[in-house]
């Protein structure tokens, strides 16, 4: 019996690409996934991504072992079929982390893009900005 068997990888077909959802709520994941020089840069950061679903209803986008987004509803069915076909193999794709117009980190899933990035599709962002915490205790709201 082999305990530590490395799973193979399958390249995901994401077409022209898409912007992952829920990035605003997952900014902590971006901070953990990107190095200090990458976070300080205003240029898009090229990253390798893994698409995963652990039996849940949503498909997550993982970058360097950190969840940084979700596959938007318009692409879920196609990606779910690819996950099923991949079996135990990892479903991987290239991507780019970039800053949107409001300064949030966002994630482009797919082949490298030249020029401006589109915004997320309507309905892709449903979670709010997380509250600031210290040692797990929420801090009072700064805005009011």
Image (cartoon, grey):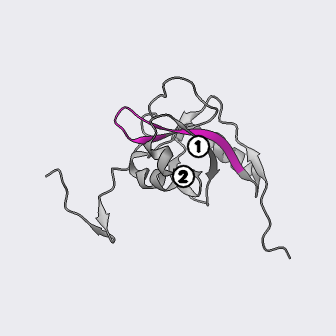
User: SS for tag 1?
Assistant: helix
Residue 109 left/right relative to 105: right
Is residue 100 shown in magenta?
yes
How many C-alpha atoms fall within 10 Å of the one at disc 2: few (<14), some, or many (≥20)? Answer: some
- Residue farthest along the top direction in this orientation: 115
- Residue farthest along the bottom direction in this orientation: 1
The boundaries of the magenta stretch are 91-106
User: SS for tag 2?
Assistant: loop
Q: Nearer the viewer, residue 121 or 129?
A: 129
Residue linked to disc 2 = 58
Q: Which mark is residue 76?
A: 1
Where is residue 114, by image quadrant? Answer: top right
Q: Where is residue 43 shown, x and y percent of the image?
A: 49, 34
Is residue 103 shown in magenta?
yes
135 versus 16 height, above or below: below
Q: Nearer the viewer, residue 105 or 87?
A: 105
Q: Where is residue 4 shown, x and y percent of the image?
A: 78, 70
Q: Quadrant of the N terminus?
A: bottom right
Residue shown at the point (29%, 59%) measured from the top left: 132
Residue 55 left/right relative to 6: left
Residue shown at the point (47%, 43%) measured from the top left: 21
Residue shown at the point (76%, 50%) measured from the top left: 9
- The prevailing secondary structure element of the residues shown in magenta is strand
32 versus 70 height, above or below: below
Query: Marks 2 and 1: in contact by CB < 8 Å?
Result: yes
Q: Where is residue 17 shown, x and y percent of the image?
A: 60, 32
């Amino acid at each position: 019996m082999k305990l530590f068997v490395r799973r193979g990888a399958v390249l995901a077909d994401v077409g022209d690409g898409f912007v992952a959802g829920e990035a605003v709520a997952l900014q902590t994941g971006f901070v953990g996934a990107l190095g200090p020089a990458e976070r300080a840069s205003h240029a898009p950061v090229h990253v390798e991504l893994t698409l995963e679903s652990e039996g849940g209803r949503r498909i997550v986008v993982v970058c360097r072992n950190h969840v940084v987004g979700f596959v938007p509803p318009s692409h879920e069915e196609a990606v779910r079929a690819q996950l099923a076909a991949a079996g135990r193999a990892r479903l991987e794709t290239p991507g780019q982390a970039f800053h949107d117009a409001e300064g949030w980190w966002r994630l482009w899933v797919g082949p490298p893009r030249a020029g401006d990035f589109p915004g997320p599709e309507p309905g892709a962002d449903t979670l709010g900005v997380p509250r600031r915490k210290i040692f797990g205790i929420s801090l009072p709201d700064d805005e009011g």
